Structures are given as C-alpha cells and as structure tokens.
Image (cartoon, rainbow, N blue to C red):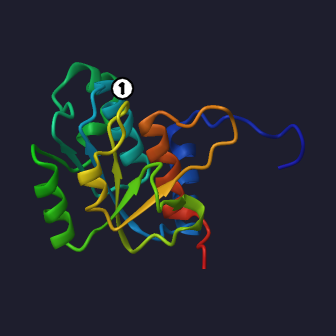
Amino acid sequence: MADGELRTLRGKMEVRKLMREAEAAHQPQVELAFLLQDWDDPYNVGGMFRVADACGAVRMVLTGKTPAPPHPQIHVTSMGNHRRVDWEQQERHDEAIAQLKAEGWTLVAVEIAEGAVPYTQYDFPARTCLVLGNEEKGMYDRVLRQCDAAVYIPMGGKGRSLNVHVSGAVVAFHALYGPRAT
C-alpha cells in the first residue's frame, strides 16, 4: 500500500481473509499448551484464555487454586474465548506435570530463574507447554525443578516483570512464529 492507504479492517470477511493469508504464509513452528500454576486473579485467567485462543494453543491446564470457568470475571475478560480452548483443572501441580510429560510435552517455565535463557535464544521443541507461575510469588521451586527448561523476557526498563498473561503471550508468539536460535 502506498502512503495514506492504510486503514483499519472492520468487516468480518476482510479480517478472516487477512488471517487466512497470514496463516498460509506463516505456519506455526510448534504445538503449544499452557500450564497456569496457582494464579489468583480471574481477570488474568480470562486474558490467558484470549491469548491461548489467539495463538491456537491446543490445551490449557489450570492447577491448584487457579480460578476456572464458569466464573463471571473470566467470562468477561476472555470475551467468550474460554469456550474455544480445551482446558482442564487439576488440583495437584505434580500430577498435571507428570501427565503432560507422559503425553510428550516439553515443559518450559517462563520465569526469572537461575539457568533460564532469554526466550529469543531458546529453540522451542515441537510440543511445548509453557508453564506460568503465580502473579505475585512466581513459580514454586518444586514446579520449576520439574520443568525441562526455563526462559525469561529481558527487560529494558526499571521494572522486572510484565503481567503474567502478557508474558505468556510474548513467549508464545515467539515460540510459534519467531526465528529459530540455531
């Protein structure tokens, strides 16, 4: 398009056409799932359902005390996307992790942790489950130790974190469409 020709697509058909073209040009490089460890805020859970749907995640596992649908705040924030994402709730983190590993998922913690690498330098395996810890306390050490790898998002400002579902989105879309490190 020439200068001045950019415009917001408003019609559903126009948006669908654009998304089909993008999907044909950029095939995801991994199959993606999420594990949410003891999240507190249902608004964050709803936001994560939106992220999971937007990136085509095949599964989301809510563990511990993480709020689950039906929940009015999840419904509002997810804009109904909680109905499009396969999800399950499991009380015990270790059982959820064992089940995912038995199914062939590689668990990658999104956490500022010793031994973690910048997410842009990690080669995400074909079946990646991103593990995201509690909004305030982060990931429990016992959960982190069960993960196969850990990545973090380098921060350029004075803050050292993003909202948890925003962090999930950043790493997920890089895993799906970003350049490979090797």
The percent position of residue 23, horizontal first and vertical second, equals 52, 62
Q: Is residue 4 left or right of residue 155?
A: right
Foreground pick, 140 / 31: 140
Residue 8 falls in which quadrant of the image? top right
Q: Is residue 147 left or right of residue 151?
A: left
The percent position of residue 142, horizontal first and vertical second, equals 23, 53
Foreground pick, 37 / 51: 37
Which residue in the structure is indicated by mark 1? Answer: 77
**Figure check: 86 above or below 47:** below
Foreground pick, 41 / 11: 41
Residue 63 falls in which quadrant of the image? top left
Name the residue at the top extreme.
Answer: 72
At 55% from the left and 36% from the top, the residue drawn is: 11
The percent position of residue 148, horizontal first and vertical second, equals 33, 68
Helix, strand or loop status at disc 1: helix
Q: Is residue 182 left or right of residue 112?
A: right
Q: Mark 1 belongs to which amino acid?
A: Thr
**Figure check: 139 above or below 98:** above
Foreground pick, 68 / 90: 90
